[in-house]
C-alpha cells in the first residue's frame, strides 16, 4: 500500500456511502472526531502512518461507524431519555445498554445497505475484542465479578444476536456458563429471550424501548431473587452451552456461518445471496449469509449460547445473596461499563497513533489536505434535456453503435458457452454416441457450462469545458451516447454519465445518466451538452466525483472512461491521481481523446488505456476496440 492510498480510499469510500448526506470527510491534526455545526456533519481523521494495516482498518471502521450514526441514529431519543429519567442513578446503565443496542442497529443497517461494510465492521469488532482479551490476560490475577459478567454478557450477546460477529462467541459461552452456575438457568434464559429482540430493532426508538425492557428485567430479577422466585437452576427453554435447537455453533450450523468457511460465500465483492442495496435473501448486505439475519427478523437462536440443559441444584442462600448484590450494583452503576463505545475507543487509538507517527516523522501533517478539500467541495446538478436535439443525437448514436452492439453480442455469446465434459445424463448426445455405448461408455451427453462474465460498473466522465463546443462537442456526445447504447443490452454491465467543466465553477458536476436510468434519458440530457459553453477542464474534480459514485457499486469491476479534447487543469496532479486510483482502488481508468487530442490523452492515461477519435465515422471501430478491452481483458 502506497503512502497515499488509504488517504485516497477513505474519502472515496466514506463519501460514497454518505453521498445522500451532507458530510465532510477531512484529514488533519491528531484528533479523530465526528461533530456537527448547525446541520453540517464532519468526520475528521488524524494523519497517521498508512503503512500500518491495523491503523488503516481502524480508520476505515471509525469513519464508517460514525457515518452510520449520522445516517441512522435519532439523537433526540437519547436526549429525551436523559431528560425524562427521574432517578439519575439509573442513567449510567441505561445509557450503556442503549449505546450497545444502538451500535448493533447501526452496524446491521450499514451491513445491509453498503458494500464492504460488514467485513470492515467485523474486523473492527475483532480488533477491539483482541485488545480486550490482552487486557484481561494482563490482569489475569483479578477474578471477574458477577456484576461485570452480566454486563459484559449483554454486550457480547447483543452483537451475536444482531450481527453474528463470531469474535464474541467464545467469550459469550464462558460468561453464560458462569452466569447460569451462579444465578440460575432461568435468569439467563429469560435474559436471552429479551436480548434476541435486538435483531428486530429498526429505529432509535426501538433501541430505547428494548433498553427499558432489559433495564426493567434486571431490576425485577433482583426482586425475584429476594422473593425466592429465582434460583432454580433448571429451565424448560433448553438453553446451555453444548447443543441447541437452532443447531448453530462456531464450527458448524444450518446456516453454516463460521470463521473459515461458509456456504453464504461472504465477501466484499460477490455473494450467492444476490444482495442489493435495500434487500436480499440473506438480509445482510454484501457480507452476510443465509442465516436470515437482517433488519426485520432473525430466526437465529445462537447455538453457542443455548442447549438442552439438565436440571441442576438450586442456588444456595449465599449464591442468591451474591446475585442480589450483583444486580444491585449493576442497577446503581457500580458495574464496569468499559465496553460500551466502539467509536470512542477507536478515536482514542487513532489519536494516540497519530501523535506517535507525527513525532517519529512517519507522516507529514500536510499530506492529502488538497484531496479532501476537492472531494468535499463537489456539488451536483442535473442537465436539462432538449427533445428536439435529443432525437437527432439518438439517430446518430444508433447508426454508429449498431456495429459495436452486434460484434459485442456475438463475442459475449461465444465466451459464455463452453463445452467442458461428457455426462451420462443430458439432452444433447455427442456425434458418436452409438459407438461409445457399444464400447460400454455411457457418458454420451455433452454438458455445456454457461460461463458468467464479470459484473462491471462503468462511469463516463465527459469534458464539458468551453473548448468542447461545436463539432468536438457533437463528436463527444455521439461517442458517449453510442457507448451507452451499445452496452445497454448487456446484462452484466451498468453505466452512468457525468460532465465536468460545464460551468465556470470547478466544483459543479452535472449528472447526465444515473446507473438506474435509460439511454433515452441520457440522450435528452446530452443534448444540453452539445450547446453548452463551459469553463475550464477540472478533470481532478471529475475523477473524484466518478470515484465517489462508482465506489458504492457492488460490481466486481469498476471502470472510469474520460472523454476530453485537451489538457486538463492541474495535469500533473491528474496523472498522479489516475495512478493512485489504479494502484490502490482497483478502478480502471480509460481516456478518449476527441479531435486532435490523442497526443494529450496517451501521456495522461497511458498508451494501453487511451484512444483517439478525430471524426464521427471513426467511432464504430475505435469504440469496439475500447469496449472489447473493457469487457473481456
Image (cartoon, helix red, strand yellow):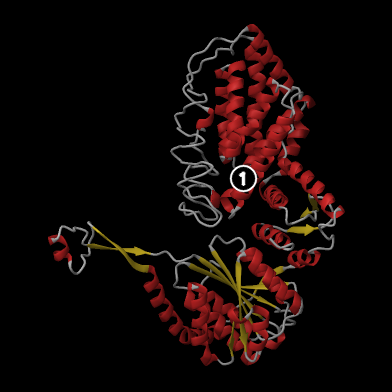
Q: Place residue 152 in its image quadrant.
A: top right
Q: Residue sitting at 51 percent across and 40 percent down? A: 297
Q: Place residue 150 in its image quadrant.
A: top right
Q: Tell me if I can see residue 39 in this picture.
A: no
Q: Tell me if I can see residue 355 in this picture.
A: yes
Q: Where residue 79 sits in the image (x, y, percent)?
A: 76, 38
Q: Residue sitting at 14 percent across and 60 percent down? A: 439
Q: Where residue 548 sits in the image (x, y, percent)?
A: 66, 64
Q: Residues within 10 Å of mark 1 (few under 14, many from 20)?
A: many
Horizontal arrangement in the rendering, residue 454 relative to residue 129 (left or right): left
User: 250 or 195: nearer the eye?
Assistant: 250
- Image position of 520 with respect to 225: above or below: below
Q: Where residue 588 sits in the image (x, y, percent)?
A: 59, 71
Q: Residue furthest top?
A: 317
- Image position of 87 with respect to 4: above or below: above
Q: How many marks?
A: 1
- Image position of 570 with respect to 22: above or below: below
Q: Residue sitting at 62 percent across and 37 percent down? A: 206
Q: Which residue is mark 1?
A: 122
Q: Residue furthest left?
A: 438
Q: Residue furthest right?
A: 359
Horizontal arrangement in the rendering, residue 102 relative to residue 623 (left or right): right
Q: Place residue 370 in its image quadrant.
A: bottom right
Quadrant housing the N terminus: bottom right
Q: Secondary structure at mark 1?
A: helix
Q: Where residue 130 sits in the image (x, y, percent)?
A: 67, 38
Amino acid at each position: 500500500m502506497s503512502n497515499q492510498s488509504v488517504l485516497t480510499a477513505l474519502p472515496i469510500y466514506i463519501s460514497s456511502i454518505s453521498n445522500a448526506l451532507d458530510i465532510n470527510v477531512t484529514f488533519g491534526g491528531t484528533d479523530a472526531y465526528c461533530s456537527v455545526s448547525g446541520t453540517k456533519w464532519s468526520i475528521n481523521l488524524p494523519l497517521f502512518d498508512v503503512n500500518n494495516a491495523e491503523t488503516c482498518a481502524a480508520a476505515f471502521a471509525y469513519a464508517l461507524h460514525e457515518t452510520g450514526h449520522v445516517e441512522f441514529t435519532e439523537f433526540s431519543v437519547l436526549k429525551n431519555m436523559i431528560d425524562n429519567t427521574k432517578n439519575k442513578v439509573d442513567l449510567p446503565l441505561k445509557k450503556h445498554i442503549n449505546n450497545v443496542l444502538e451500535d448493533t442497529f447501526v452496524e446491521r443497517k450499514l451491513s445491509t445497505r453498503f458494500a464492504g461494510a460488514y467485513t470492515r465492521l467485523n474486523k473492527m469488532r475483532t480488533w477491539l475484542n483482541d485488545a480486550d482479551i490482552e487486557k484481561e490476560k494482563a490482569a489475569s490475577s483479578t477474578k471477574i465479578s458477577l456484576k461485570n459478567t452480566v454486563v459484559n454478557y449483554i454486550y457480547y450477546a447483543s452483537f451475536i444476536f444482531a450481527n453474528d460477529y463470531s469474535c464474541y462467541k467464545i467469550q459469550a459461552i464462558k460468561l453464560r456458563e458462569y452466569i447460569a452456575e451462579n444465578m440460575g438457568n432461568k435468569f439467563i434464559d429469560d435474559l436471552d429471550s429479551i436480548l434476541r429482540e435486538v435483531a428486530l430493532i429498526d429505529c432509535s426508538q426501538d433501541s430505547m424501548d428494548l433498553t427499558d425492557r432489559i433495564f426493567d428485567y434486571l431490576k425485577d430479577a433482583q426482586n425475584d431473587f429476594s422473593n425466592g422466585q429465582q434460583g432454580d437452576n433448571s429451565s424448560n427453554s433448553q438453553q446451555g452451552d453444548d447443543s441447541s435447537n437452532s443447531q448453530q455453533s462456531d464450527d458448524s450450523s444450518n446456516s453454516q456461518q463460521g470463521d473459515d468457511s461458509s456456504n453464504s460465500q461472504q465477501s466484499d465483492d460477490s455473494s450467492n445471496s444476490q444482495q442489493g442495496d435495500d434487500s436480499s435473501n440473506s438480509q445482510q448486505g454484501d457480507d452476510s449469509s443465509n442465516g436470515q439475519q437482517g433488519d426485520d427478523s432473525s430466526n437465529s437462536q445462537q447455538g453457542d449460547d443455548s442447549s438442552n440443559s439438565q436440571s441442576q441444584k438450586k442456588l444456595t442462600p449465599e449464591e442468591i445473596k451474591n446475585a442480589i448484590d450483583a444486580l444491585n450494583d449493576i442497577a446503581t452503576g457500580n458495574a464496569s461499563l468499559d465496553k460500551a463505545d466502539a467509536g470512542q475507543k477507536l478515536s482514542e487509538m487513532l489519536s494516540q497513533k497519530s501523535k506517535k507517527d507525527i513525532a517519529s516523522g512517519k507522516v507529514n501533517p500536510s499530506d492529502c489536505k488538497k484531496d479532501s478539500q476537492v472531494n468535499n467541495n463537489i456539488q451536483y446538478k442535473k442537465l436539462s434535456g432538449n427533445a428536439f436535439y435529443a432525437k437527432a443525437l439518438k439517430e446518430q448514436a444508433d447508426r454508429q453503435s449498431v456495429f459495436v452492439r452486434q460484434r459485442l453480442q456475438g463475442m459475449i455469446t461465444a465466451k459464455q458457452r463452453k463445452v467442458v465434459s461428457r455426462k451420462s445424463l443430458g439432452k444433447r448426445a455427442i456425434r458418436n454416441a452409438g459407438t461409445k455405448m457399444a464400447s460400454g461408455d455411457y457418458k454420451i451427453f455433452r454438458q455445456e457450462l454457461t460461463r458468467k462474465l464479470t459484473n462491471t460498473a462503468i462511469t463516463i466522465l465527459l469534458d464539458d469545458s468551453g473548448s468542447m463546443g461545436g463539432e468536438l462537442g457533437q463528436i463527444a456526445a455521439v461517442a458517449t451516447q453510442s457507448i451507452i447504447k451499445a452496452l445497454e443490452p448487456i446484462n452484466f454491465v451498468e453505466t452512468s454519465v457525468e460532465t465536468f467543466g460545464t460551468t465556470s465553477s470547478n466544483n459543479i458536476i452535472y449528472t447526465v445518466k444515473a446507473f438506474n436510468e435509460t439511454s433515452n434519458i441520457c440522450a435528452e440530457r446530452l443534448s444540453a451538452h452539445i450547446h453548452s459553453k463551459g469553463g475550464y477542464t477540472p478533470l481532478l474534480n471529475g475523477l473524484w466525483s466518478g470515484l465517489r459514485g462508482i465506489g458504492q457499486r457492488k460490481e466486481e469491476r469498476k471502470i472510469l472512461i474520460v472523454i476530453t479534447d485537451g489538457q486538463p487543469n492541474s495535469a500533473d496532479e491528474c496523472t498522479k491521481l489516475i495512478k493512485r486510483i489504479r494502484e490502490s482502488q482497483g478502478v480502471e481508468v480509460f481516456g478518449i481523446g476527441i479531435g486532435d487530442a490523442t497526443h494529450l490523452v496517451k501521456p495522461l492515461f497511458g498508451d494501453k488505456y487511451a484512444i483517439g477519435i478525430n471524426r464521427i465515422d471513426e467511432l464504430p471501430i475505435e469504440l469496439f476496440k475500447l469496449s472489447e478491452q473493457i469487457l473481456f481483458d
